[in-house]
Image (tube, rainbow, N blue to C red):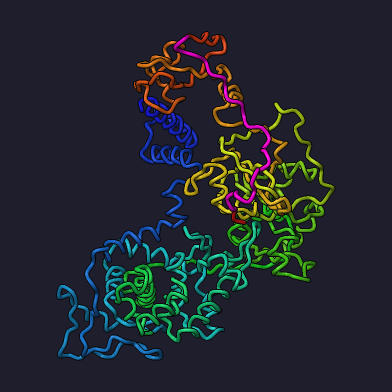
Amino acid sequence: MRLAWILSSVAFASALSATAFAAGPKTNAKPTAQDQAQARAQIRRQIAGGPTADEANAGVESAELAELRAAERELFPPAAPAIGNAWPSELPAWREPGTTSLPAQPESHAPPAEGGKDLTWLSSLALPDLPVRFDARVVRYLEMYKDDPRARSVLSFWRRRAGRFKDAIERVLRRKNMPLDLVWLAMIESGFDATARSPAGAVGLWQFMPETGRLYALPQDRFVDLRMDVTAETEAAADFLSDLHRRFGSWDLAMASYNMGYAGIVAAERKYNTNDFWTLSKLEGSLPWETTLYVPKILAAAIAMKNPKVFGLDTVTPDAPIEFDEVRAPFGVALSAIAQASNVPVKDLEALNPELRASRTPPKESDVAQAVLGQNLDRGWALRVPLGKGAQVTASLGKIKHDEIALERYVVRFGETIDQIAQAHGTTNAKIAEINGIAPGELVRGGTLILVPHGTARVATTATTNADKPVAVVQPDLFVYPGRKRVFYKVSVGDNLKDLADALHVSVDDLRKWNDVDPSARLQEGMMLQAFVPIDADLSRVAVLAENDVRVMTTGSDEFVAYFEKTRHRVIVTARAGETVESIGKRFSVPGSMMERINRRPRADVLRDGETVVVYLQNTQNPPAPTANASILPNPSPLGALPTAPHPERLPPTTL
């Protein structure tokens, strides 16, 4: 424990120094709290082997969304009582589409609220073109937007940023004859951040999940993600919401299903026998808590944006709309090269084209280029450039030296590295990284489609001597399966048993049994797994080693100890009655802690006469000669070739 504390302290100090150095030279500067937090985060990433649990759970949520969620947790705590309507029955709480304001409030009744609050100010609000019901949750959001400094700050930021996208979104909604105030759904989804990414994998202004995006003409590959193309994703979002509204006939339910999925809404309607969102939102177990707040939050935000003076937003100046020229650029050209040739800042090109994941136009062989252009590849890729720069950029494109090499599609096999792919295709790591926009340190997992230079693949040479072969450590258990062959797989970062089992045509339980691994635990890079696969199995998706291409060692064998211990050899000692694990270790100058570790039992265990204990001797030590009461047993030999099963019909079944 003490050693672990010392090591972690040293790591923290090193990380802190690196963080301070990166921040710039400071004479006798004391590390700030931010420096210390960054250093801790760096160490946590090392421990986690990637993003920490906090980072994985948080996704890439913006500071504004996080601030709003913090305010929500106070407004709607988990133990909050059931919420009813804030309006009395005499005053209709429903604003029908086509009207411009709430029905007039009867003079004899001031609308009471929880705690006796005066809510008469609500009746003077201008309302959006979405149906509004003044449910208590809507009222609470309106109060928060009006009175909570954090919420007002978030709304102010979003109102300013809305200017970039609002006109373009409303043009699409108007053309499709949809409520224009659906624009605020995008604000609640992403805070008008075109590159927003959720922990669940939703991306873009409208937060499309991968499969839903593909369904609505937003394909993705490692070069382009059209979920971040504001024009394309707005068209897709309008179509998606229009389909949901056609399904449910209600914008409340359409918005709710956008959040939780239409199948969940349908199931809730059938289960509770109601098609009213506000009723469903109050029924026990019907909708997720997030969805019950989602619709009120959008409606309250739309109301706030319609009434900027009431909510302190009238002094906010929206950003100018994003305007641009569109040019046709060659495939596979880096934005930095275009920027340099046309004297346009590269950051402007990246900001206008966030869907270009590799900061370059896609190769024409990419999935998205093929899907978007089809037979019109000769037109080039549509690239947005700053307004007024279209002619200048077009003229400069002809000056760019572009190495148009022939490319072919290649699916990375599980366990395969970029080094191996480059060697097999007669190219370099750098060239493959350049073509595919692979960032330094980026993990390219098995099953990923990449592009490689077209050419004659080189046959990789294999090790010829046993000492040169990679080592595969196996447990002493014997597995014999007629009609199968044993192969080995070296684990890469990010591998999991489910994907490997699918690629090897075996089951997860098979891999667990053959390798004594925990299916719920993470596989560590460098582990070597054995698998008994059908002889005719298609292993083209996975990089495996044949049995004769590895050096197989059984745990605890003489060969195993010689390979891993280097300076020690293994002997087995027969104990005399009354001896302990520790006392036998002392006879051979082996510490009690190591004896415990080797024999998996406490050092103080009293041994019976004839019990055996394993001892690792230094190579300079000779085994003691056997005596009447103590002897050295022969070392176990490692497993050889698997014998033929005497009764194949009795073997346990395997699952394909």
Q: From the top left corner, tell me how far across and down residue 157 is, in percent.
A: 41, 63
Q: Quadrant of residue 375?
A: bottom right
Q: Quadrant of residue 229?
A: bottom right
Name the residue rendered at 29%, 79% in the picture.
135
Magenta residues, start to end: 628-653
In the drawing, does residue 319 fall left or right of residue 137? right
Residue at the outermost right position? 456
Q: From the top left corner, tell me how far across and down residue 326 is, in percent.
A: 68, 68
Q: From the top left corner, tell me how far across and down residue 538 is, in percent.
A: 72, 54
Q: How many numbered discs? A: 0
Task: Identify the main secondary structure in magenta.
Answer: loop
Name the residue rendered at 45%, 64% in the picture.
191
Q: Is residue 342 above or below residue 300?
A: above
Q: Quadrant of residue 74?
A: bottom left
Is residue 340 in view?
no
Is residue 324 in view?
yes
Indicate yes or no whether the magenta region holds residue 636.
Answer: yes
In the drawing, does residue 283 fall left or right of residue 243? left
Q: Is residue 153 above or below residue 295?
A: above
**Is the N terminus in the top left, top right, bottom left or bottom right quadrant?**
top left
Q: From the top left corner, tell me how far across and down residue 624 is, in percent.
A: 51, 9
**Is the C terminus in the top left, top right, bottom left or bottom right quadrant?**
bottom right
Name the residue rendered at 44%, 66% in the picture.
160
State the residue in front, 521 or 507.
507
Indicate yes or no whether the magenta region holds residue 330.
Answer: no
Name the residue rendered at 83%, 49% in the picture.
455
State the residue in front, 264 or 332.
264
State the residue in front, 80 or 233.
80
